[in-house]
Amino acid sequence: MIFFRIKRIMLLFLLFYMPILYAETQPTLPMQSDSKNKKIFKSETEKIGYALGVSLGNYVNQSFEKQKKLGIKLDKYSLLLGIQDAISNNLQLSNQEISEILEKLEKKLKNATKIQIKKDEKENLIQGQLYMKEFSKIKGVRQTESGLMYLIEKPGKGEKITENTEITVHYKGSLINGIEFDNSYIRGKPVTFMLKDVILGWQEGLKYIKKNGKIKLVIPPSLGYGNTGLNGIPGNSTLIFDIELVDVKND
């Protein structure tokens, strides 16, 4: 039971913290100022063990900082003591006590995470509206009744696009803070799909251009992924897409 509860708690850490950690620059490890204090490793096995320990330590340090923002304070040195006692099989608490403590922590983490996500969703909505207000000041930008904003960079020529049109596009997708979440140019290959199968912002916006056209779309959450978000895209995110319509096929 304890093992499975620990797995659930670690899963919470991974789900909530890892997307943030990947988006941030990893901290630089402090340099050893005194070479005399350096550990001399006797084998490759010792080096591997140390490297794994450093990796775990960095993760713990960063996780603890994130937890503080959730209002949860844990003692990292007690954590290290727990690891040490578990390895030496010299536990200071009974298995029952440990199980009860972890169960409380799991509930606390879930509640704190839900509260933080709600705060982030609200803030994302506000920041998105501010961004769209500024974007609307750019020459050539238009806004539709649905709330979609677009800027046609190249109209293109050819057949009219409908929901049943098969389109091939190159595109770059990013958040208003500049973080890029998708880019077909980097993958080196355009994407083909039916227009009716994509988010509402694309369904509406791509009808304003034709083959070889280019357009920038600023899509509010209601026309994107809503308050649930997606992997790499937080809830209530305003999305920015730069799209190039490579090909169009109508049956």
Image (tube, rainbow, N blue to C red):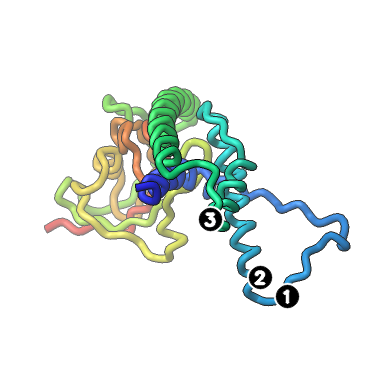
Residue 114, label in figure: none
| In this rendering, position of residue 181 left or right of residue 211 | right
Looking at the picture, tell me which residue is in the foreground, 184 or 17: 17
Tell me the crowding category of disc 3: few under 14, some 14 to 19, or many 20 or more residues within 10 angstroms, Cα based.
Answer: few
* Residue at left offset 43%, top offset 65%: 188
Q: Residue at x 23, y 56 (%)?
A: 193
Q: Secondary structure at mark 3?
A: loop
Residue 89 marker: 3
Asked if disc 2 and disc 3 are in contact, CB closer than 8 Å, the reply is no
Residue 113 appears anywhere in the view: no
Amino acid at pointer 2: Glu
Residue matched to label 2: 46
Q: Is residue 50 visible?
A: yes
At horizontal 30% and vertical 54% (from top left) the residue drawn is: 211
Dot 3 or dot 1, earlier in sequence: 1
Q: Considering only vertical position in the picture, is 187 above or below 181?
A: below
In the image, residue 244 lies at what x, y percent?
Answer: 37, 53
